[in-house]
Amino acid sequence: MKYWGIAALVLVLALYFLGNVILPFVLGGAIAYVLDPLADRLERLGLSRAMSVAVIAIVATVIFVLLVLLIIPVLVQQTGSLFTFIGNSVEKTPEAVARLDEWLARNVPILAENNINVADQLRRAADVVQAKGGDLLNTILTSAMSLINVMVLLVVVPVVAVYLLYDWDNMTAKVDELLPRDHVSRIRQIARDIDRTLASFIRGQGLVCLILGIFYAVSLMAVGLQFGLIAGAVAGLLTFIPYVGALVGGALSIGLALFQFWGPLEVDGEMVRQGTDWFRIGMVAGIFALGQFLEGNFLTPKLVGSSVGLHPVWLIFALSVFGTMFGFVGMLVAVPVAACIGVIARHAVESYKDGRLYKGHTDQE
C-alpha cells in the first residue's frame, strides 16, 4: 500500500508541476492506447507490427487532412457568425420583445415597481454579444493556441503516438515482468478490469460521440437550422459526459430554432399572420429525442456496455476536480484516473467483505 501511495503522489506532483510539458506525451499515449486493438487486429490479419502502424498512420493522416480542409473552416466560420446572429435575431423581433415585456409587467408587478424593462435588457445583452462575441472567440482561440502549441499538435503528438503504438506490446510485457511475484495475479486482475473499463468507456463512448455528432449535425442542417453543424458538434462532443451532451446540445439547438423560426410573417410591410414555424421547431426537438432514444437503446448498450461502472456523477466530479487542479491535462487524465479509482475501490470492497473485519469471528459460510 505504501508503494501505491508513493506512486499516486508522484503522479499528482507530475501533473501539477509538469502539466504543459507532459501534455504531448499524455495525448500520444491516449491515442496509442485507443488504436492498439486495431493494430493487434491488423497483425492477426497477417500484417507485421510496423506495417499495421504504418497503415493506421496513413489513414489517420488522410482523415485529419479532410477535417482541416472540409469541416474545421466551416465550424470556425459558423462559430464566428453565431454571436452576430443572436444579436440580430433579437433586434429583428422588437414586437415580440415588447410583448414579452408587457406580459412580464402585467404578471410580474415587481419588475414594473423597480423600473426593470426586460426589452431594454435584452437589447443591451444582444449588443454586448454582437460587439464582444468575436473578441471572445479570438481570445479563446488565442489562449488555446498558447496552451497547446500548433507544432506540438501537428508534430510531437503524432510522433509520440506512433512510437508508443509500435512498442505497446513490448512495454506492457516489460511492466508485467516488474510486478511483485507474490501479488502478480491480483495486480493482473485489477489491470484487466481497468483496461476493460477504459476500453468500454473511452473507445465505446468515443464512437458514440462520433456517431451522434454526425447524426445531429446532418439532421439539423437537413431541417434548415442555421449553425446546425456547430450545435451537432457541441452535442456530440459533450455526449462524452452522460446526459450533458443532449441537454446542452438540445437547449442550444432549440434556442437557435426559436430565434430562426419564431416571428411574424410580413406581406407588403403588414403582418398578416403569425409566422412561427412550429413544424421545424418540433423537428429540431424531435431530432434530439430520437438521438437520445438511439443512444440509450442501441448505441450505448452495444458499444459501451453495462459493465463500465463509471457513474455519471462520479465522472462529472472527476472532470471538475482534475480540470480545476491541473487544467487541460487534468481533464485528459480525469477519466482514466476515475476508472482506476473505481476499479480499485470495487476490489477493496471485495477484499473487505472477504476479511475478518467484515465477517467477524464467526464463520459465515
Image: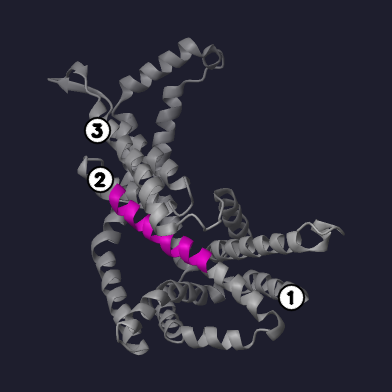
Q: Closest to the observer: 303 or 4? A: 303
Mark 2 to mark 1 CA distance (whole Å):
50 Å
Q: Residues within 10 Å of mark 3 (few under 14, many from 20)?
A: many
Sequence-wise, the earlier of marks 2 and 1 is 1
* Residue 177 falls in image quadrant: bottom right
Above-or-below relation of 111 to 238: above
Q: Mark 3 or mark 2: which comes first in sequence?
A: 2
Q: Are discs 3 and 2 less than 8 Å apart at CB? A: no
Callout 1, which amino acid?
Ile
Where, quadrant-wise, is the N terminus in this rendering? bottom right
- Kindly identify the residue that appears in the image at 58 percent across and 48 percent down: 313
Q: Is residue 244 visible?
A: yes
Instruction: Say the numbered circle drawn on residue 56.
Output: none
Could you say where residue 294 lies in the image, as x and y percent from the top left?
Answer: 34, 46
According to the image, label 2 marks what residue?
219
Residue assigned mark 3: 280
Q: Name the residue rendered at 58%, 73% in the picture.
A: 191
Q: How many marks?
A: 3
Q: Is residue 212 above or below residue 354?
A: above
Q: Position of residue 52 (x, y in %)?
A: 33, 83
Mark 1 surroundings within 10 Å by alpha-carbon count, few (fewer than 14), some (14 through 19), many (20 or more): few
Q: 232 or 170: which is nearer to us?
A: 170
Residue type, numbered disc 3: Arg
Magenta part of the chain: 196-216
Q: CA distance from mark 3 to mark 1?
A: 58 Å
Query: Residue at the location (61% across, 60% down)?
Result: 322
Magenta segment includes 79: no
Q: Helix, strand or loop at disc 2?
A: helix
Name the main secondary structure of what is drawn in magenta.
Answer: helix
